[in-house]
Structure formats: structure tokens, C-alpha cells
Amino acid sequence: MTSKHSDPKTIRLAIPNKGRISGPIIELIEKSGLHIHNGGERQLIAKTCDPHVEVIYARPIDIPAYVASGAADLGITGKDMVMERNSDVEELLDLKMGRATLVLAVPENSGIESAKQLEGKKIATEFPGISGKYFAEAGISVTIVPVGGACEATPHLGISDAIIDLSSSGTTLKTNRLVVIDEILHSCTILIANKESCRQKKEKIDELHLALESVLKAQGQCYLMMNVRKDALDEVRLVLPGLSGPTIMDIASDENLVAVHAVVAEERVYQLINLLKRAGAKDILVMSIERMIR
């Protein structure tokens, strides 16, 4: 469907207006260089430092519909939300956050061990679309009870016999004495696009896509710079392979030294520093990386 907002040159990006992933999403956008100009907490549409990019704040469950209809060109929401709304959108990028599993869970003392035992039972969920499809495909007749929150409490209140809900660590389920009997789908936070916008505004969408992806690629990486004696270079190379091998440059002021630069996993730095010193490196600098484009 064609994008319906007025300016054909403007990209509208819909992001969650609240929830646990709202903060990390805004942080990701800011790190990408696309700074949001907030005019107040109740603002629904915000300008950015790019005059051709606007941000729309919306409920995560509504974002797939916004994007599918063309009210927004791009959106960031959970994959589970896209599936729940059965939205015809393009999935562009896994944002490496908000990972969770949609599970079928029952009270631990219920004696129920499989979905088939729920025939004729009541299932409480915030995902009636996905849940209905799951049971229909399994040939199990149940009553879906849509709820707006606190799904895990419904079996103990007599509202349901089981629940279908998102779980990231399993702590909430355990606290409410619920056990998982099936995993329905794995979800994460994704960047989605209106299919027509992908054709009509490809250049601008690719630009924003690349900006976000570059931040994700930089996560967990750091930049090392050091000086190395030429006679110790081979040993340093063995210690420091880097992403594509280290970059080596001559130092004009000293013919016996070269500058060595490399991108390495942050988790390796603690041990690498000592190994590099032993191999003959000195003047070692460690710097964080905000964006990385390969």
C-alpha cells in the first residue's frame, strides 16, 4: 500500500511510546546519529535532525498496522506484534534486543503436560490471533480469553486454565507457579517497512537502515591502537588477528616502529593487553566504537 502521509520526500518512523524496549530503541536511534527533537511527553510526532525523517510514537501493537497501511514508512516493534496483526510488511533488520519466547503455560499442579489436554479449556492471552491459529492448526478446540495484562494471574483467579504469554527469563512464570508445556514462537525487536515505501523511498530507507545496522555491528567491539617494533610485528599479528587482520602503518618519526590498529571483541581486551605487551606492543590505546560499517 502506498504511503499516505503528505510529504513524499519524508520518511516516518514509528517507535514504541512506552514499554521496556522504548528506552533502548531511542538510545539506538540516537547513537545512529538521528537525533530526535522532543517537544514534550505527549507529543505524537517528533522532528529529527534530518528534515526528511519524522518519528511517530505509537503503541507497539499498533505499529505493524501503521506501517502496513502506509501511515508510517518504517517501524520498530516486536516480531510477535507483526505476527499478531498478520501485517504485510517487509522485515529489514533484527535489532538484537527484546528477545522473548511466546509460551503456553499451565499451573504447576494442574497435571496438564501437553496442549492436547487443553481441549475445551480456557486460554488467557494478549495474543488472541497467534493463539487462535496455534490451536486451530493443532486441531484443539479451546476458548480464547483476551486480556490486556497480568496474564499470568488469570489461572489462579479462575479466569483461565492456561495462558499464552511472552517470557524472557521465566522468572515471572516461576513466581506465579506456572510451567511451560510448549514454545509457540521466538520473538525479537525488528525494523519493518511498508513495501511500497521500500520502492518509492528506497534511498532514504537504505540510509536509515544502514545507520541503525552500523550501531548494532559496533556493539561489543572496541578499537585498539598501538606502536610495535618491526621485529616484533609477526608475533603481534599472531596475537591480534582483528576483523580482517590488523591495519599496519609506518611511523614517519621512527623507522623501527609501526602503528597497528585493529577492531577486536570487547570481551577479549582484558587478556589481549597483557599478551600484546609481552609480544612487543607499547603505547596501547583502547577506544569504544559507536558505529561500524563494513
Image (tube, rainbow, N blue to C red):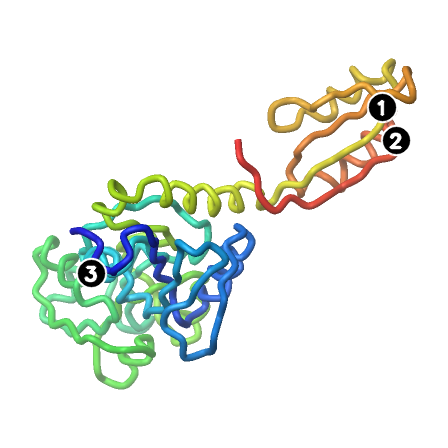
- Residue drawn at x 84%, y 27% is 227
Say which residue label 2 marks. Answer: 282
**Quadrant in which residue 151 is drawn:** bottom left
- Residue drawn at x 63%, y 41% is 221
Amino acid type shown at disc 1: Val
Q: Residues within 10 Å of mark 3 (few under 14, many from 20)?
A: some
The answer to which of 85 and 105 lies nearer the viewer is 85
Amino acid type shown at disc 3: Arg
Say which residue label 1 marks. Answer: 228
200 shown above or below 257:
below
Counting residues from the N terminus, which is met first, the one under dot 1 or under dot 3? 3
Residue 141 appears left or right of 52 = left
Picture coordinates of residue 53 (x, y %)? 40, 55
**Quadrant in which residue 240 is drawn:** top right
Picture coordinates of residue 173 (x, y %)? 39, 70
Image mark for residue 85? 3
Number of labelled discs? 3
Counting residues from the N terminus, which is met first, the one under dot 3 or under dot 2? 3
Amino acid type shown at disc 2: Lys
- Residue drawn at x 21%, y 75% is 161
Whether tag 1 and tag 2 are in contact, CB under 8 A, the answer is yes
